[in-house]
Amino acid sequence: MGQKRFSRQVILPQLGTAGQQKLRKARVLVAGCGALGSHTAAALLRAGVGNLILVDRDLVEESNLHRVAAFIDQDVGRPKAEALANRLQAIWPEANLEAWVIHLGPREAEELIPKVELVVDGLDNLESRYTVNDACIKHGVPWIYTAVLATYGMTMAILPGEGPCLRCLFPNPPPPGALPTCATAGILGPVPQALAAWQAAAAIQLLVGAPELIPGELLYFDLWTRKVNTIQVARAPSCPACVEKRLEFLDRPSRTATLCGEVVQILPRERGNLDLVELAGRLSRLGKAELRGGVVVAEVEGASFTVFPDGRALIKGVPDPGRAQALYDQYIAR
């Protein structure tokens, strides 16, 4: 590790050489590589975190570019995790970066989370966050909850066994469509970067063992009004996850999730290997369909499909998850 690269950080009494070495050896899972996750990943990489696992199921879209510094026009249509890994590798070639183009469901969370010391949040839906929360509790891995919307965001470090978890804060998932998304409420471009800075700083504190970090301290920050509030979240006495250890989101996975941008994700009943050429040909008889960048992109019955080789699909234009599931079962699954 070059001494000059991190010299301004090493002189901080909060880190020093020992702290910098801990960062170099640390392994961090970045769950989601959109605006929030990509800015967090870049901040951690530049701070000297030497091992990052980048996980995202989606492709770069043009609408991402106003708030994601890591992506450029040429990245549109590429998997976010791969595009981000390429950009970060150019920043620090010595870093060990893994790009996983997958949905972070129960099976994947159980596989990846035990391999890391920390998980940082770049997700866009609560169901996936509940899955991460359960897996982190099960395996004793700290994680940082962070969410952004419109002009504001919030973040809280979750340390299993030492404070509240996500379900102490939000006991149960809301009904589909009940929460606003960036598609309905919008998002100010600098907001993910601002919250990513808070998240990255907390991550560095966790990785070096800084005593200043307080479990359950929820920070709310509105970038437009410049208001910052801190709330101490208490551990719920009957929390089903961290107290009763009923890790429901690992035991009963859902095949559907409503994502940011009014996108419904459908997972296959069993992971497989679709014949995308055959699928594109079949769907082309019903509407527009083509094989593009390793995925099938189609327009059928007013819905937009993006189908991945493992059978996973993103469906736009159908806000009802049940209807999206029915379209998937009709046109994709057999």
Image (tube, helix red, strand yellow):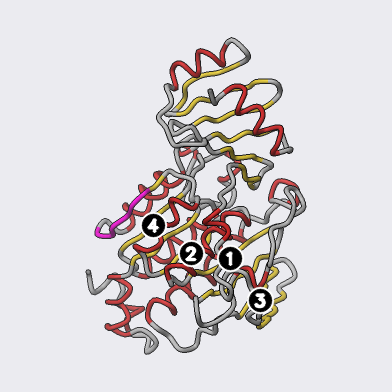
Tell me the tag on residue 332.
none
Among the two numbered marks 4 and 2 on one chain, the one whose residue lies closer to the N terminus: 4
Which quadrant is home to the N terminus?
bottom left
Q: Label 2, label 1: how many angstroms apart (C-alpha)?
A: 8 Å
Amino acid found under the numbered disc labelled 2: Val
Q: Which residue is mark 4?
A: 112
Q: Which residues are magenta?
A: 94-99
Q: Is residue 129 above or below residue 5?
A: above
Q: Label 3, label 4: how many angstroms apart (C-alpha)?
A: 28 Å
Amino acid found under the numbered disc labelled 1: Thr
Q: Nearer the viewer, mark 2 or mark 3?
A: 3
Residue shown at the point (61%, 28%) measured from the top left: 328
- Asked if the residue under mark 1 is in contact with the one under mark 4, i.e. CB atoms within 8 Å, the reply is no
Q: Which residue is mark 2?
A: 120
Among the two numbered marks 2 and 3 on one chain, the one whose residue lies closer to the N terminus: 2
Q: Is residue 32 above or below residue 210?
A: above
Q: Which residue is mark 3?
A: 238
Q: Which residue is mark 1?
A: 146
Check disc 2 and report its element: helix, strand or loop: strand
